Image (cartoon, rainbow, N blue to C red):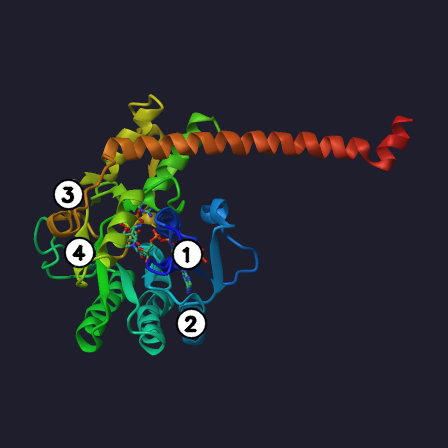
């Protein structure tokens, strides 16, 4: 979309742009002609792998969900039409070990950002990354926007807090604030400590003879797994509606971790994966969410949203991407060794020794 007087280029600020969803959302917004700003927290060594291919197309602004002053500065600087709040401590098991930090990032962080928006420009449209984890100990099957929440972890409780604040700021101050209750969504960019990517990475390493086993927790947990690229489209659609709202985004299909293992090992032709999988109590959670299945009828009806990637396609995509990545890493490591040897041979001492 070219910038003209009648249709000015839209501007979006994405928190969590370095994460899985942030990177796909940034791609989608750039494709739609947006000027994209990403909030990043300063780390001693940067972790921007997911967005390295977008480096010259997005503007990164320093900020942290813990620091309201930095959020106000980022919102002022970006002058966004839309803010997508994707940043969070997003790992459920980690939230049991770091509950206070999780509440600060994942819960209070939402409030700080909503306050920053209210202070700078209440006309900004806001997206909150709510989660199916809020349903926890599920009260009905499948789960809809009206299903009662029963969160089972500090992460989920923090998400419920952020969710209700989003609703409250919509009702109290008339903000165009929407919440996507997204069920699990995965991709080759998923963090390596989530179960799907942990499995596909292990399958790739087993395929290349680099490891023999993977240690996992509860294999009977069931999740409604979709593709992240599909889910960021739903986020954008929510902010294009005249009225804000809450939407479940899901495939409607549920699969166990065992079924994921069947499909992933199937890609490399292994039918009996039991000799490669060790069940380790270290990966169990103090309270488990046993099964989740979403009903995305509202998103389909009002947003015209549909998932495009099936469960077997998703698993294949992830395993194939990891096989390719592991192969490249090995080649790089070998080339690195060769290069190091070459450099050593070129060193003055080696030259002198060679005569
Ligand atoms: P992710 O890969 O873990 O990314 C999280 C992002 O948050 C990273 O960019 C991280 O930055 C950033 N972040 C963490 N703490 C921050 C802080 N204090 N200040 C600023 N940035 C911070 O998560 P994701 O899978 O893309 O998920 C995106 C959002 O959707 C999250 O809020 C998650 O809880 C929610 N969600 C995810 C799913 C799912 O299945 N993926 C489902 C429902 C809801 P660093 O690179 O610096 O760590
Ligand atoms: O676990 C079981 C585990 O960590 C899925 C986040 O994006 O989605 C994600 O949360 C299931 C659980 O995702 C291992 O016990 C077995 O039942 O991949 P996960 P999650 O907890 O569902 C929701 C919607 C979010 O909002 C979150 O941000 O798999 N499981 N063995 C394991 N899980 C992990 N991580 N590691 C294992 O070894």
Instruction: Say whether marks 1 and 3 touch (CB < 8 Å).
Output: no
- Residue 71 appears at what percent x and percent y? 41, 71
Mark 1 or mark 3, whichever is nearer to me: 1
Kindly report the distance in space between the C-alpha atoms of the residues bearing marks 2 and 4. 28 Å
- Residue 197 appears at what percent x and percent y? 36, 41
- Residue 190 appears at what percent x and percent y? 37, 45
| Res 189 quadrant in image | top left
Instruction: Say whether marks 1 and 2 touch (CB < 8 Å).
Output: no
The residue furthest top is: 269
- Say whether mark 3 is within 8 Å of ligand 2: no
Instruction: Say whether marks 2 and 4 touch (CB < 8 Å).
Output: no
Q: Which mark is residue 35?
A: 1
Measured along the vertical axis of the image, is residue 220 above or below residue 81? above
The residue lying toward the viewer, choosing from 293 and 246, is 246
Identify the residue at image location x=22%, y=61%: 179
The residue lying toward the viewer, choosing from 269 and 60, is 60
Secondary element under disc 4, as helix, strand or loop, is strand
Pointer 3: what residue? Answer: 252
Kindly report the distance in space between the C-alpha atoms of the residues bearing marks 1 and 2. 15 Å
Secondary element under disc 3, as helix, strand or loop, is loop
């Amino acid at each position: 979309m070219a910038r003209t007087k009648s249709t000015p280029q839209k501007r979006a600020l994405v928190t969590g742009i370095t994460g899985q969803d942030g990177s796909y959302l940034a791609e989608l917004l750039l494709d739609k002609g947006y000027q994209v700003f990403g909030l990043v927290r300063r780390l001693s060594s940067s972790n921007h792998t997911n967005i390295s291919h977008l480096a010259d197309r997005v503007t990164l602004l320093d900020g942290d969900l813990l620091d309201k002053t930095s959020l106000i500065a980022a919102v002022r600087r970006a002058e966004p039409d839309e803010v997508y709040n994707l940043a969070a401590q997003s790992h459920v098991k980690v939230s049991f070990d770091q509950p206070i930090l999780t509440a600060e990032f994942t819960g209070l962080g939402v409030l700080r950002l909503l306050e920053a928006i209210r202070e700078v420009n209440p006309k900004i449209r806001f997206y909150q990354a709510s989660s199916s984890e809020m349903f926890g100990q599920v009260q009905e099957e499948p789960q809809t926007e009206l299903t009662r929440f029963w969160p089972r972890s500090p992460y989920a409780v923090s998400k419920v807090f952020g969710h209700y604040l989003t609703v409250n700021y919509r009702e109290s101050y008339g903000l165009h604030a929407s919440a996507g209750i997204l069920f699990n969504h995965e991709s080759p960019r998923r963090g390596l400590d989530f179960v799907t990517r942990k499995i596909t990475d292990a399958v790739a390493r087993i395929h290349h003879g680099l490891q023999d086993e993977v240690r996992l927790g509860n294999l009977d947990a069931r999740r409604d797994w979709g593709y992240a690229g599909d889910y960021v489209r739903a986020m954008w659609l929510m902010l294009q509606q005249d009225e804000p709202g809450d939407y479940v985004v899901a495939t409607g299909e549920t699969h166990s971790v065992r079924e994921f293992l069947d499909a992933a090992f199937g890609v490399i032709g292994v039918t009996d994966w039991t000799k490669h999988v060790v069940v380790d109590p270290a990966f169990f959670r103090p309270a488990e969410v046993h099964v989740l299945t979403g009903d995305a009828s509202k998103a389909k009806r009002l947003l015209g949203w549909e998932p495009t990637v099936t469960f077997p396609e998703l698993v294949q995509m992830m395993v194939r991407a990891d096989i390719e990545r592991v192969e490249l890493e090995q080649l790089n490591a070998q080339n690195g060794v060769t290069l190091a040897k070459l450099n050593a041979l070129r060193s003055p001492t080696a030259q002198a020794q060679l005569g």
